[in-house]
Amino acid sequence: MWWLFLLSYVISGNALKLAAYISAGGLHGEVRFEQKTENSIRIRFALQTTLQYPDQQWFWSITQFPVDYTVIDDRCSRRHLGESIIDLTDLVGPLEMPGNETGSVEVPGVTLTGEKGLWGKGLLLKDSYTSRVICASITVFEKNTEKFAEARFYGPVAGTVWFRWLGGQAGDNITDTIIYADLYHVNNKKLQIDYTEHHWKIYVTDIFNIGKDKSSCNILQTVFDPDNAGPGKSIGDVDTRLGKIKVAVKQSLKYKTSYRDPELSLLPADLLGPHRLLYLVIFHPTHDDSFLACAKINHRKPILAKTLISSRGIKGEVTLSQETPFNPTWINISLIPVNLETRLRYATKVAYYRIHELPPEPAKFLEDVGEPCLTTKNMYNPTKIDEKTVPPAGLGTQDQYSIGDLSGKLQGRKEGSYHTDILPGSAKLHGIYWDVYLPLSGIHSIVHRSLVIHKYNETDNKGIIPWVCGTFALHLPQNAGQMPMFTAQVIFRYPIVGKIIFRQPKNNPEADTTIIIENLVHADGSALNNSAEHRWMVHDNPPGKDYYNWTGRCLSAGAPYNPHKIDWDPNQTEYCSTVEVSLCRLGDLTRHGKLEIAGKKLYGPLLTRKLFTDTMLPLSGRNSILGKSLVIYDDHGPVARGERLACSTIGGLYRLKAIAKDWFGNGEPVNIRGKLEFIQQSEYDVTDIEINLEGLGGKMSGYHIHMTPVEIDLEFPCEATSLYNYWNPLGVNSSNIPGSKEGTSDQYEMGDLSGKFGTLDNRKKYTTSYNDTLLPLFGPRSIFGHSVVIHKKDKNLRWACSTIERGYAPSEAVELRAIASFHHPQGFAYGYVKMSQLAYKDGSQSETVIEVKLRHPGNHDRNITRNHNWAIYVNPVGVDAAVKVKDTRCVAGGYTWNPYFTQLADPLNEDLYRQECGPDLPLRCQVGDISSRLGPINIGTERRVFTDPNFPLDGPVSAMGKSIVIMDRDFGSNRFACANIEPDNDIVKYANIRKPPRFVV
């Protein structure tokens, strides 16, 4: 009842209200702060004790600084919260439980804002019976009333200056400004003093320099003075109002300081403007006219992460939001079962909700192989809490559970709202909750990790199994869709294979970067045992050809990347860690721990897959790591080779757009206009779909993705004899699917768009957008090279069709097309193998889409043979393609292409190669060994479309000019047919022919 009263009071009133959310040390609940009179406040509290700590007496006080919720361990220490500045125990007495769980108290001499204000401070509680200490930030109750900015320094001064505004726009009733400064030197450790003092000011860029990245502070010339107040009196003259700023000589001796500066109250309006950039400048301590360091003041926006669920009859989303690191995270769980059976199961069989260490592994196979939720590893538990000692779900405080244990922290908590439809005793979560141990930024961020909902195994009602899962991705506010991300990747090919992915919000180099180690496996045949203790670093240069040297390997990569010129002492490596990241060279990723490399692919996912969050790893801007190299070290290897084991270039992994827009009628003219667009940022993201179609005439119904591209020279190009059935790689039973829009994505055939999202019935024009958790543009199930077919409502006849092609900007990439044409009059196969790939300007490449259409020639064109292996051979072929004797047929092709020396140390061990190479680790295969990655092909059957991640058509390693060799049927080893891989130039030409008049003046 208190909750409802307070909520209505907040909505109807216009007064500022503050809140502190507590869940630690056996105390859980909320404390609210309201202005009572001009010089007093009223504190309202609604608290609960746990069974473990029923008797409590808390001495409470207000601290200088709020709680940094990115810090998990020791967050309530004086180092983080500063001094206690208001002793509430002296003013109103201690908090005692039981008996005072709810109530209110008036505190004289304290205000919400101003010199004695509580806003932006911390609440510290110390238990008099034990040594327990707990804390919470005092935040604004209503969202979107505060604004934040951050100036982050890296060298020679490192640290952060936070700007925090209440109001901040002209006309706001209440305005206030707080500054937190936490700075230290990274190179002056020999000074015999504790700190230095510096002038500091806010500078503004010239309007003509708005697009320039400031590589030097010296380009800044103007102190920020929008009111023309004059030198020493402007808004940017912070030091004249607040005094000099302190910079600690050593990071361990912090001089964290808070300031209040009402003069800066309207700065957010300038900060968010489009015309100029603001920089915070710190001057040299002895040369007052010389800049020591500068940093751009960046507006810090709230972080919003979502996982979209559409699986096993459960639809909806789970949303996490955190305004700043000083605010708790708000959780909105909105998952709806699609039918009564699933609703009952969801209400009674759910065991717990957990966040796991990793996102589900992207699909490796075309078919449905394995449970994706089992690839997420364990519950996320970076603080190593012993699961055997935690209280039952909902009976402890949030500090007692793992970060990923949502059920433990939230079950039974009803402080939020919309907790409807939860049966007594059910583990179901629904509605809005808050969590003070669920950071969305910093090294313990859960962004890009997975939500896994577990249920009781209904076969025995005892075991607990994963049921539904999804990945937390960053989103834009107001349901504007996914956050645009930039993704980079490193592909290792020798002597190890594997990928490392880097992801960061686009054009935001100071945002957190997620690092996903996908799979690292020894591949040269010399190491079959797992190895550990591998350092890993970003280096200055892309590697040369010494990446496979036996001596002096990877020396071309240069030195570790250190743009901030951090003094580095190899004898004191402990200074560099994820906690003190600014004391590390930027490229030294060993701060996250050393890597492990599997000896065999069997151990790869479990041993090597990891996820880290780095707070200082830009993928854009002047210090971007793009185009540099990632070096993996081996300190126990051969002396001649050196300490560097492997290296590879950091390249872009660009978002993919698929588009269907060129429409063909099925034996009749059609006037359809418009397109379908599919966009997927990476294989870890859902696919966004936008549809805009006109000319439907109100007579259409279903639209689906089919198996092959449109053959435009056919009279009836959309028929099942050419495009076949729906794209259905997971083998969903088409006779047992829900009605349109009544199920989840996995319950329909993958290409059944109208089944998942609604039909075109009675539509003359159709415009919509949606997202699909199961319609990939990456990987073996990619829809590139397939087609969209629109069906009539009458008899479900096929009306129009269009091939799904790549959408790209010519300024960013070029599409390469190649063909292996089997057309020799005396040859043994007739048809083609077509390939296409995007080559980006930075040298990165997309996956290659392959279309295979082959039959037997001449009188045997109705014959069918199956299970032909196929491969790329190193040389082109000639007349030997038509030799009748199989022993000498296609001999000019040579042997299987292996440009990356796969299994170089043990090339004759065929058993080892067959064991390790496969679709689940395509980089372990020789590039030319197509059938081991994609499977065999058939001759004389329907066309097939494949997606190959290891078939380059461009660059120094290219299949162009080589040959494709098809082996005998039933996995035979003799060469059956071959053709050369050549550029597939467009031979269709268009011309406008004009007939001149007979009489010309």
Image (cartoon, helix red, strand yellow):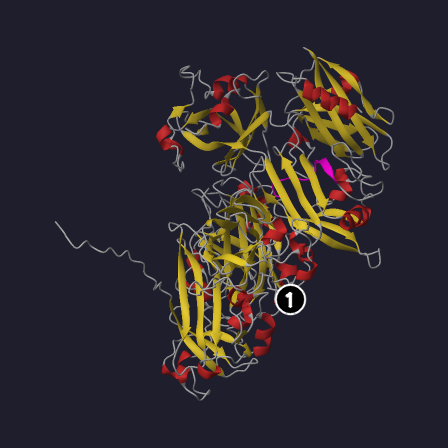
Magenta span includes 433: yes
| Picture layout, residue 594 above or below residue 335 | below
Q: Position of residue 265 (x, y in %)?
A: 53, 19
Horizontally, residue 825 falls left or right of residue 759, namely: left
Q: How many marks?
A: 1
Q: Nearer the viewer, residue 772 or 514?
A: 772
Q: Residues within 10 Å of mark 1 (few under 14, many from 20)?
A: some
Q: Nearer the viewer, residue 392 or 233?
A: 392
- Which residue ends up furthest to the bottom in the rendered image? 885
Q: Quadrant of residue 982?
A: bottom left
Q: Give the residue type at disc 1.
A: Leu
- Which residue ends up furthest to the top in the rendered image? 38
- Which residue ends up furthest to the front in the rendered image? 999
Query: Looking at the image, can residue 386 be seen?
Result: no
Secondary structure beneath label 1 = helix
Q: Quadrant of residue 528?
A: bottom right
| Picture layout, residue 521 above or below residue 415 | below
| Picture layout, residue 871 above or below residue 565 | below
Magenta span includes 778: no
Q: Position of residue 99 (x, y in %)?
A: 87, 25
- Kindly identify which residue carries mark 1: 602
Q: Nearer the viewer, residue 900 or 872?
A: 872
Q: Quadrant of residue 953?
A: bottom left
Q: Nearer the viewer, residue 98 or 91?
A: 98
What are the residue bounds of the magenta stretch?
A: 430-446
Residue at 52%, 45% (x, y): give it: 764
Residue at 70%, 59% (x, y): give it: 736
Query: Looking at the image, can residue 128 be seen?
Result: yes
Q: Position of residue 779 (x, y in %)?
A: 55, 59
